[in-house]
Image: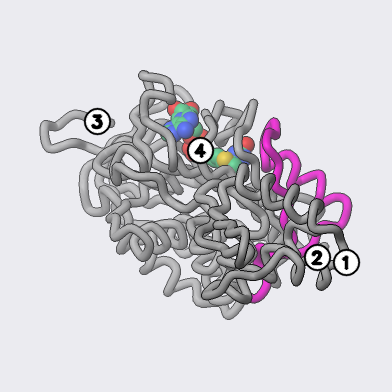
Amino acid sequence: MVSHEILNILAANSEDYVSGERISQQLHVTRAAIWKQIKVLKEEGFEIEGQTKNGYRLMGTPLSLNEWALKQALTTTSLGYAIDLEDELVSTNARSKELARQGGVHGQIVLAKHQSAGRGRLQRQWESPRGGLWMSVLLRPNLSLADASKLTLAASVAIVDALRELFQLSIGIKWPNDLIFNGQKIAGILGEVVGEWNAVQTLILGIGINANFPREQLNTSLNATTLHEILGYEVNLNVLAAGILKHLENQVISLEKKAFEELRSNWSERALGLGEEVRILRGEQVFQGIFKGISIDGELILETEDGEKIFTAGEVQLRSKEGKYF
Ligand code: BT5
């Protein structure tokens, strides 16, 4: 793409102005074509200063999702280099599954600026207004099916660490993988297995982060918050995506080395409600007890009056200081 090549040239000379003539010679396109592309890039949020005498200089990149800016921000070795970025998708997980069936590579990511029908677990609706980070990562890790399922736990740890590193935020994990800031949900993860037993496991990790939009854009009934609400400014979504992918890649590598105990302890250190009284909702049933911890496979261990119970799925309700469950 010519626009990416222009950006490459400007980025390589970021201390300097580059003349339109030089760009046009290097790329074998007319100066008018360059001017046109620069105009488009500016509309996409690139800050490009143009001086009649000296030419162009790249002063800033967009905060919103952009393929070139995301690639620049990546520090991974395998995740995030194949990018499918769309303005709108029904669900990035649905698209990612399609791509997986068509042979999509390990680390391929799908992003949408807006999802018309984003999904949570059990087909629940996931509200996905513009400004959020709605991303799915296709993984073909060297793991058995049982171990691949640990990747959703690993993804929660990766997101907590990325948000801490980038914004110094302290996020807690509510089992199995809700990400909570001050009692409100800021992000969710949907892990889905694609394909067959015995074959290489393919997993789609859908990651949704309420980022650059005010909380008012979400349904009032939700107990939710956004980065914009917490930080008071817009974050760079490309840097955020790249940060998450870096931490996720490290998690995948460590799972492939079978560092399951390390994952369990990392997850537990970031968990909410451990050692406290919680409620577990499973269908119509409600269980109450002390949240003892998670098993090596990520199941929740609850100590109830009738003894220990193990949960593979369900909703956790934590107990607030006032004694209310939420
Ligand atoms: C989740 O499900 O938390 C997983 C969310 C995964 C979303 C990503 S976005 C990219 C990818 N593409 C998709 O289609 N999905 C993934 P769960 O734990 O089941 O929570 C769903 C519940 O969270 C809903 O029933 C609402 O109560 C609440 N909710 C919906 N939208 C929300 C939002 N934007 N922020 C906070 N809570 C929300």
Residue position marked by numbered label 2 in the rendering: 24
Considering only order in the chain, which callout, 1 or 3, is on the residue closer to the N terminus?
Answer: 1
Amino acid marked by disc 2: Ser
**Ligand 1 closer than 8 Å to label 2 CB:** no
> Where is the N terminus found, in terms of image quarters?
bottom right
Q: CA gap, disc 1 to disc 2?
A: 6 Å
Res 28 label? 1
Q: How many marks?
A: 4
Q: Nearer the viewer, residue 234 or 222?
A: 234
Q: CA gap, disc 1 to disc 4?
A: 36 Å
Residue position marked by numbered label 4 in the rendering: 131
Q: Position of residue 8 (x, y in %)?
A: 69, 69
Q: CA gap, disc 3 to disc 1?
A: 65 Å
Secondary element under disc 4, as helix, strand or loop, is loop
Query: Given this view, does label 3 or label 1 mark the residue nearer the observer?
Result: 1
Q: CA gap, disc 4 to disc 2?
A: 34 Å
Q: CA gap, disc 2 to disc 3?
A: 64 Å
Q: CA gap, disc 4 to disc 3?
A: 31 Å
Which residue lies at the image location 73% right of the left edge and 61% below the top edge? 4
Residue position marked by numbered label 3 in the rendering: 325
